Amino acid sequence: MSRVRSPGHPRKSAKPTRAHAITPPQIRWLGALLIAAQLPQAVHLPIWVALAGFTLVLVRLALLERNRARPHAKPARIPSWALVVFAIAAAGAVKMSFGYLLGREPSIAFLYILVGIKFLETRTTRDGALLCCLACFLLITPFLYSQSLFAALAALPALLIVGATLDALNRVPTDSAILAPWRETVRRSGIMLLQGVPIAVLLFLLFPRLASPLWGLPADYRATTGLSDRMSPGQISDLSLSDTVAFRVDFEGPVPAPSQRYWRGPVLARFDGRSWTATRAESQGELARYDAPAIAYTVALEPHDKPWLFALDVPAALPRLPGSPIGDPGNEIGALTRDQRLLARTPVAQPLRYTQVSVLRDRYPGHPGLDISPNVQLPRGNDRTLEFARELRSTYSHDRAYISAVLRWFNTENFVYTLTPPLVGRDPVDFFLFKERRGFCEHYASAFVVLLRAAGIPARVVTGYQGGEINPRGG
């Protein structure tokens, strides 16, 4: 049986598309894309990182113009080993600047610099396509800080240029269209963007709103000002000020002075050598009675998914629903613990309004059932701090004199308040008191309580909000 071979074109095996050498116009498009992608992120980075990223891009463009001006000379290039050394140096500089390397902030900064390094070694269109992907990823990073309309508008130029750059990269060097005017390339990119608008609108309307993003970010050693039921001095390298509203207050009478407006929050008494946490809540039972006049106010608390409520020191009544009489158990929404914490019955998961009465005092009456032994306990470690406390205690045997001596030592020594303290390892109190001496309120509160406990004086960390902004329209 003979085989009949049908006529036709002979078959050819599939081969991967060859990556062409990148051309000067394509390099210019890549440079414009990187600058457009870097600009929105530059405002969130240290100045030296932003300048380094821009400089690397400009160096590549300068080398391109130098080679164009000298067509017969050997093309100027930066050797690969030099780029590797520069990348290692950049990683070290980022580590020194942020205090750590694995986290959102330093990772973005490192990517910002690596994109410029990759641009310096780009040789083929395949390298250019990879650089476009990195630029798109870099373009997303500003939205980790803000999802405002301004942030979206700042990203539009880069979106337009990324389409134009991809259009230029997908034209082979022999294609005459690669030398087309830049306006034509931008026009084609704009048309592609407009074609994607209906899909974007559809996704905006139909895609479900999630409580948390789809991506997962590693835990970052950065925090914002606020309250937590856990305090770990030395584990946060950058503290940013937050203007998020925690709660609003409407006073029935005159507004107390800022020094009297301390809103007591979580009380942290358990210390493991690094972190402070709250102990088990124990109800106080009957409220203490005070002779001083009380002030009444209504709190509008924002949800924070924790059970604690806020009140001026010291609470003279349990929080209750607005408009209900004092002492009506049916309208009371929380309880007062022995360490003067106000706790709601359930975590505050939605806005909550309650009425509160307080007496402006800085002392609490003694409680016969209060066990103070947990407030003098200290774990092992921080040996230098304990030795210093023993030496100071031998000079000042009276509690009041010892406390005054500790505060005076803080004021006279070279301590600095900063929102960017360094990260520490073991014995964070020793590191803060005797080596770095730079920190924010958590460092000072933790060190002060440890010094008091080391002298046998019961102490704990009390967190809260101080002062507040007066709303001239609301009182």
Image (tube, rainbow, N blue to C red):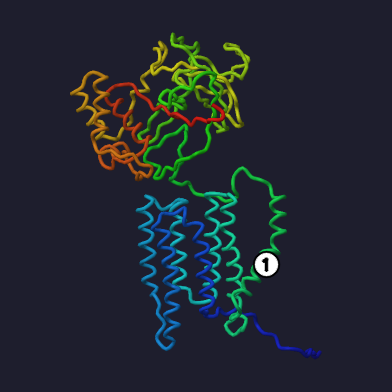
Q: Residue at x 34, y 25 (%)?
A: 377
Relative to 397, does residue 5 appear above or below in the rendering?
A: below
Q: Residue 440: name its quadrant.
A: top left
Q: Is residue 301 left or right of residue 264?
A: right
Q: Nearer the viewer, residue 82 or 171?
A: 171
Q: Residue at x 26, y 42 (%)?
A: 435
Q: State the residue lying farthest toward the left.
A: 395
Q: Is residue 17 left or right of residue 92?
A: right
Residue 471 horizontal/vertical position (percent): 53, 31
How many marks do you count on the picture? Answer: 1
Q: Residue 249: name its quadrant.
A: top right
Q: State the residue lying farthest toward the right.
A: 1
Residue 186 horizontal/vertical position (percent): 62, 71
Q: Nearer the viewer, residue 472 or 299?
A: 472
Q: Residue at x 51, y 77 (%)?
A: 124
Relative to 17, does residue 45 appear above or below in the rendering?
A: above
Q: Residue 6: name its quadrant.
A: bottom right
Relative to 413, does residue 3 appear above or below in the rendering?
A: below
Image quadrant where one finds the N terminus? bottom right
Residue 475 horizontal/vertical position (percent): 54, 26
Q: Is residue 375 left or right of residue 384?
A: right
Residue 144 horizontal/vertical position (percent): 53, 50
Q: Amino acid at mark 1?
A: Met
Q: Is residue 392 left or right of residue 160?
A: left
Callout 1: 10 Å neighbours few (<14), some, many (20+)? some
Q: Which residue bears the numbered disc 1?
A: 192
The secondary element bearing badge 1 is classed as helix
